[in-house]
């Protein structure tokens, strides 16, 4: 491979000197957490704290009324499901996603119900979801997988409330709306590998004041609110909030770079795919046609390119902890699990376009 293709002008994730200086200032201040929980003074981050400022900036940036900062995307999803109230009821979810999407349903006392996915988008199929809906359905949980903000119009028309798992699609836009803001609530992850990396961290967003109020109490032990129910500590650390605030300011630039890299990759890949401006390419997927997948992965690895097999293999419906929640056949998800590959965290914004082209070349030469 040419030296230019290996060039890494910055490491990923990278943080500006201004961000590093602000983290140092927080550490010197000794104020590493800034939460309040009292009906007389309010609940959530203290006014002026880093977490408080992050919430207001997310509300402004994504045009949503309420943002609740937490310590992970999983925590945000758990809080959203608790706020909606799914205990004892069913939540429809994809089997082709990270396990946290299903684990959060169980932690909130809900019953996962798997629906199949679309073969092109990897996201929940509205037709399949419609077949799984019952009188016990509390909500639908679509996952904007790989960074693709799926069209929510059909999903919203099915009837049950929608909670968007937008953990992999922070900053994605469709029809002037941001991922996570189309449904009753949405959640983001700021994990170190995500599009807005702060090590860990996450956020719940909603335009419903009651959902936000319930979520705020839930993520802070329900402290001083009567203890009608118990809840965890999902508060966001002030240092994480600093990193997330700076990442938010650079989000558009970085997401645009991910799109450029994806276009360069697909244009030169033997398994091309159409690019979409509603995609922010957390990872870069492709489907293998007419070739044996596992030998291809091994040959790529020998050339220095790590390619992930199937992203979720096996699909979540085959996990021992989740098998009993399967009620319908899931042929598309199972096929994608066997036919798809992805560049896991490879085409990050620090890479030159030559690196994306090199990735495509290695795949072609490894067939």
Image (cartoon, rainbow, N blue to C red):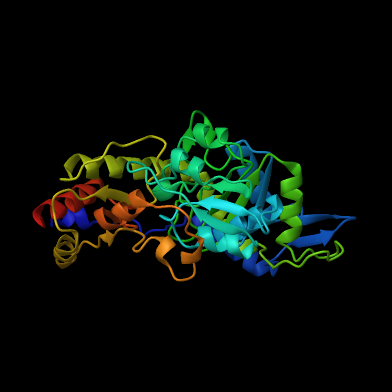
Front in this rendered view, residue 217 or 156: 156
**Count of marks, rendered view:** 0
Q: Quadrant of the C terminus?
A: bottom left
- Residue 284 screen position, x and y as percent: 31, 50
Q: Residue at x 69, y 50 (%)?
A: 84
Q: Quadrant of residue 295?
A: bottom left
Q: Residue at x 71, y 41 (%)?
A: 208
Asked if residue 50 can be seen in this view, the reply is no
- Residue 93 screen position, x and y as percent: 50, 52
- Residue 159 screen position, x and y as percent: 60, 37
- Residue 341 screen position, x and y as percent: 27, 55
Q: Is residue 271 above or below residue 46?
A: above
Q: Residue at x 44, y 45 (%)?
A: 124
Q: Residue pushed farthest right?
A: 40
Front in this rendered view, residue 323 or 95: 323
In the rendered structure, the answer to whether residue 284 lies left or right of residue 4 reads: right
Front in this rendered view, residue 12 or 63: 63
Q: Quadrant of the N terminus?
A: bottom left
Q: Residue pushed farthest top?
A: 175
Front in this rendered view, residue 296 or 34: 296
Asked if residue 120 can be seen in this view, the reply is yes
């Amino acid at each position: 491979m040419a030296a230019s293709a290996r060039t890494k002008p910055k490491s990923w994730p990278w943080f500006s000197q201004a961000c590093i200086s602000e983290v140092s200032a927080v550490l010197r201040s000794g104020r590493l957490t800034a939460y309040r929980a009292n009906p007389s003074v309010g609940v959530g981050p203290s006014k002026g704290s880093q977490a408080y400022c992050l919430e207001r900036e997310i509300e402004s940036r994504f045009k949503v009324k309420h943002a609740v900062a937490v310590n992970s995307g999983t925590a945000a999803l758990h809080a959203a499901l608790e706020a909606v109230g799914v205990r004892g009821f069913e939540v429809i979810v994809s089997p082709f996603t990270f396990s946290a999407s299903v684990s959060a349903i169980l932690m909130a006392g809900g019953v996962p119900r798997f629906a199949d996915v679309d073969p092109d988008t990897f996201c929940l199929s509205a037709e399949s979801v419609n077949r799984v809906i019952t009188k016990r359905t509390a909500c639908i949980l679509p996952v904007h997988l790989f960074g693709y903000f799926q069209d929510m119009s059909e999903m919203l028309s099915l009837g049950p409330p929608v909670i968007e798992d937008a953990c992999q699609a922070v900053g994605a836009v469709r029809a002037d709306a941001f991922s996570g803001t189309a449904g009753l609530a949405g959640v983001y992850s700021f994990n170190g590998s995500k599009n807005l990396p702060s090590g860990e961290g996450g956020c719940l967003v909603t335009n419903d004041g009651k959902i936000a109020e319930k979520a705020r109490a839930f993520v802070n032990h329900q402290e001083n609110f009567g203890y009608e129910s118990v809840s965890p500590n999902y508060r966001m650390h002030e240092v994480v909030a600093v990193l997330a605030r700076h990442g938010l300011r650079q989000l558009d630039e970085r997401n645009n770079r991910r799109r450029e890299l994806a276009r360069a990759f697909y244009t030169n890949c033997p398994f091309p795919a159409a690019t979409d401006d509603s995609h922010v390419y957390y990872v870069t997927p492709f489907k293998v046609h007419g070739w044996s997948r596992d030998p291809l992965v091994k040959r790529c690895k020998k050339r220095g390119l790590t390619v992930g097999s199937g992203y979720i293999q096996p699909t979540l419906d085959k996990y021992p902890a989740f098998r009993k929640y399967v009620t319908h056949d899931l042929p598309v998800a199972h096929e994608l699990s066997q036919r798809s590959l992805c560049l896991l965290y490879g085409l990050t914004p620090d890479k030159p376009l030559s690196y994306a082209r090199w990735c495509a070349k290695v795949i072609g030469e490894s067939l």
